[in-house]
Image (cartoon, rainbow, N blue to C red):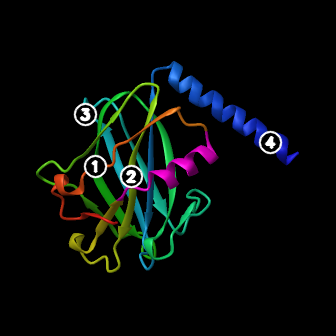
Amino acid sequence: MHISTAILAMALSCASALAAAAEGTGQLIVAIGDRPGCTSGVMLRFRSKDGRHSDFISYSQRNLVRNPREIDDGADGTGSVRVLDLAPGDWEIYEISWANTADPSYLNKYTSPDGFSIPFTVKAGEAVYIGDFQADAPTYTHASDVVMYLTNRNARDVAIAKNREAILPVVTVAVPDVEALHSPIIRFAP
């Protein structure tokens, strides 16, 4: 019974990826999580540059039903890999939000008044991997306490995505250059 369910799930997943390719959409692959000692919920909001589409991804250590812990790298954090079907075009992450899940009323956001943007491009029939985003916010007293580590772990993350669902056959690695982002909270993690 379990094997037939798994085969059905794989078939539906493959059909979904083929349908996405046929409809002219692409896929975004991104990992999101947080560091040990950081009892946060973290969210990345993104939108198409033409303003027609928007979406978000989030992760919380405390909601493992909605956020499976697929990544457990010890001191480098825990997280989940997300795959989303998106319209082709130029996109950007324009906001990072985090919350202290011990006190859900506490929510803070980082959006730059100068136009904070982490750009990426989605191509029809292809997937794009933009990195592993790990929040570290141990004190939650103000925005300067939050650091978002950005790492290129495409071998691990694309493999996780492929094991869970069908992704498009062409995967472009497009992890942004942290220095070029000029963001006080985005840092490279080796």
- Say which quarter of the image contains residue 184: bottom left
- Residue drawn 72% across and 39% down? 9
Residue type at mark 4: give it: Thr
- Pinpoint residue 88: horizontal percent, then vertical percent: 37, 27
**Residues under labels 4 and 1: Cα distance?**
38 Å
Category of crowding for the residue at label 3, using alpha-carbon neighbours closer than 10 angstroms: few (below 14), some (14–19), many (at least 20): some
**Residues under labels 3 and 4: Cα distance?**
39 Å
Left or right: where does residue 152 sit relative to residue 17? left
Quarter of the image that includes the N terminus: top right
**Residues under labels 2 and 4: Cα distance?**
31 Å
> Magenta segment range?
151-165
Q: What secondary structure is marked by label 3?
A: loop
Residue type at mark 3: give it: Lys
Q: Which residue is mark 3?
A: 49
Residue 176's label in the rendered image is: 1
Q: What secondary structure is marked by label 2?
A: strand
Depicted 52 relative to depicted 30: above or below: above
- Residue drawn 33% across and 66% down? 189
Q: Earlier in the sequence, mark 3 or mark 4?
A: 4
Residue type at mark 2: give it: Gly
Name the foreground residue: 106 vs 53.
53
Residue 5's label in the rendered image is: 4
Category of crowding for the residue at label 4, using alpha-carbon neighbours closer than 10 angstroms: few (below 14), some (14–19), many (at least 20): few
- Pinpoint residue 40: horizontal percent, then vertical percent: 42, 70
Q: Earlier in the sequence, mark 2 or mark 3?
A: 3
Q: Which residue is mark 2?
A: 131
Q: Earlier in the sequence, mark 1 or mark 3?
A: 3
Residue type at mark 1: give it: Pro
Q: Are marks 4 and 1 in contact (CB under 8 Å)?
A: no
- Pinpoint residue 123: horizontal percent, then vertical percent: 38, 28
Left or right: where does residue 141 sit relative to residue 13? left
